[in-house]
Amino acid sequence: MENKNLPIKLFKKRDEVDDRRTEGMSNDELPKWAPSREKLIERSAQFISVMEVTKSILTERRQRQNHLPAVVKVTLNEKAIAKTHRSHVGKIFNVNHKFNFVGMSDECDLLIKVDNMQDADNISRNLRLIDDNAHGLASIDKIHVYSPFVETEDGGTLKARLFNYNDYNLNRIVEQLFRESLELRDIAFKKVQYADDLTIYKLENVTIDQLHEIEHFEALYSITPMPKVTIGMDFVEADKAVEIKLPIKGVEYPIVGVLDSGIEANEHLKPWLLPDSFSPYPEDLMDRSHGTFVAGIIVYGDELESRPWTGVDGCMLYSATVFPDLRKEGIDEDQLIENIREAINSKPDIKIWNLSGGLKMECDLHDFSDFGKFLDNIQQKNDIVICKSAGNCQNFIIPATPQRIPKSADTLRSLVVGSIAHTKGLNDIAEVDWPSPFSRTGFGPNHLIKPDVTHYGGNAGKLPGGRLSTSGVYSFATDGKIVSNVGTSFSTPRVTALTAGLDHKIAENFNPLLLKALIVHSAKYPSTVSLNAVEKIKSMGYGLPDDVNNILYNSPNEITLILQDTITKGSYYEILDFPYPTDMVENGLYYGEVIITLVASPLLDSSSATEYCQSNIDVSFGTYDKIKERDISMRHILNEFGPDGALNLLREALYSKRVMDSPLNRFSNERVLRNYGKKFHPLKKYAIDLTELTESNSVKALTVPKKWFFRLEGLFNAYAEAKAANDDSIELSQEFCAIVTIRDRKNNREVYNSVSRQLDSNNFIAQNIKLRNEVNLRYGSGNAKP
């Protein structure tokens, strides 16, 4: 491969030139799937009867001097999920100038509060207005009074979640009444801070009788068992040695916080440990084995495997002990969360953290876990990146398919890391570079792609007698000896080191979106992996990231452009002279490979179940014939000009399945052509090879002299828009980082110079990414202690 020495570039959109206003057409017609008027009348009567039950509940509460709202559950028609239909439902329930939506259930039903008898009467009146509210009535299948979700019948240590009514005073009263109810029944409790918009209490030693009494509390959303934390620690001593590496005097190194079991100051790691550390546990309740192994990979990962997987020469380590020796003392989810929060808040200058541990239970398909929401919340508040393990399972011993990622790995903002095999022993199952048998897979809630990426974490199988067999990756035991182990716990620190190395190398303001985007953008699937596209992305995310140097530099035949900005509701960006090499042409058709990655900072709402992610950015890239003028005198047209004959090349339907499936296709290890549909995902990636278009689409889209466009449009959930309309303090906007790489794999054209000239001639503000002026020390160099 040609040496890469051309830095990737940052560029900015041009104000006014690339800004557009979002257009839309209102349509008051009933959808085609709407039932007849007779059916709507029948449906109206059914719904009104539920409101009568709701009124009786409110009456009974008032007689007890209880003024908490009732909550009804509204099941939407499966064809009425779109924002336009949701607004018509809102017309029925948002009465008396109130926003009454309070979230979504695990079954994806809308949850709506009814404050008092007047609101109930007004909702019933709207339900009777068949003609005025036909669209809303047609969009609703069922209405029920909400009953709390109670997962356990056994009592014990429980987690109780209360409704968030989006009203400070009402929420305060709810908590006061709930605490009084617990105190009355002698139930030990404490409030646990998961996220700003979640109200959760830990209840301890709850009896079955006590459970039956509190499960009817008026503002209770759910009661579930409090999850417990697990990690694996089966180390095998290895016949291997590695030189002790010392930080070079005068050289500054990246810093990583290790949220684990603590790090032992053995001779290999002591030089890299910061003098201060965090631990809420006494020495006799600590076992630093797991944290030491993780730390060894962060600092010595490349040397231990004799392979330059990350290109990072070392990281200073902050030891944060967030769980004890689990053989001596267990730890509940809430305790782990409190430890993580305290550790991170104690070191606000540390921006990269590793978390190789978590929960066992599979994530839900329709709701994000409270642990995942906590990780999202603390990253947003502290402006940090957490690299999180995807989790392990031993289903391969049964044998059975791997479990899905656990609750805690369904975090939107974290980089979640799976594992692939680095070697194959006699009894191992996976081929080299294939997903490790123990590595958990996606998808997460709302078809979320997790893990995000993968790295080397070992291989496994079973012996003839059925016992577990492993081929582990190397690191250190607490006494400094080299040992081996397997798990996503040990693939994750490689990505953590890579993230820290990138952040340290880049001399720009810290930007977690940029770091995540660079890592995902560089990832690809090893060429030996022949899984289909869906299985690849479920098991390996977007693939195996490159090393630091290859991420930050280009060869002459390629260029990487980075756009960082904020997009607001009512606008979008459309670059109609996007720079594509004019000479990258064969037989009158453009050719080339294009990779696009987008990472956004989404609006999140913890009460909205599968719609937890409340915002989205749609990406389009392609060609068009010419710029046309548009008639802005028409009510729905807001932009004076736009592309004529535009074709979005990120659509899978345009490409030849025969060409893509060919075993000789060299692009199969990079291709990502995923239809994200209407799913709100904050991370998207596309990788296309224009030579894979069908013949007719090639002529239609690539015939010279086509022009090129790049478009980003922000979208917001109907709930977010309605909530913002009732609260002036809410701004509907999203920060994002978009990366585009254009490459000539044939090496016929100097893409870097060609695109750079176009950026200049088209008046873009562009510059090379600022990098630290340091000697690049690859693994195996530096000060070694004999």
Image: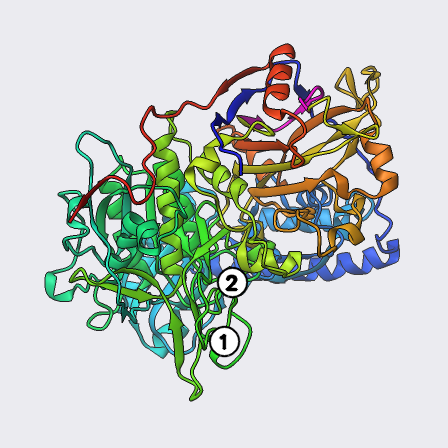
Residue at point 46%, 49% (across, down): 164
Residue 161 locus on image (x, y percent): 42, 58
Disc 1: CA contacts within 10 A as few (<14), some (14-19) or many (>=20):
some
Q: Mark 2: which amino acid?
A: Pro
Residue shown at the point (23%, 45%) measured from the top left: 317
Q: Secondary structure at mark 1?
A: helix
Q: Quadrant of residue 23?
A: top right
- Residue 577 magenta-highlighted: yes
| Residue drawn at 88 percent across, 55 percent down | 36
Q: Which residue is mark 1?
A: 396
Q: Which mark is residue 435?
A: 2
| Left or right relative to 136: residue 530 | left
Q: Nearer the viewer, mark 1 or mark 2?
A: 2
Sequence order check: which comes first, mark 1 or mark 2? Answer: 1
Task: Give the residues in magenta.
Answer: 564-580
Q: Say whether residue 34 is left or right of residue 501.
A: right
- What kind of residue is marked 1? Phe
Image location (x, y in percent) of residue 467: 40, 83
Q: Position of residue 371 (x, y in %)?
A: 40, 56
- Seen from the viewer's position, the closer of residues 134 and 230 is 230
Q: How is the image coloured?
A: rainbow
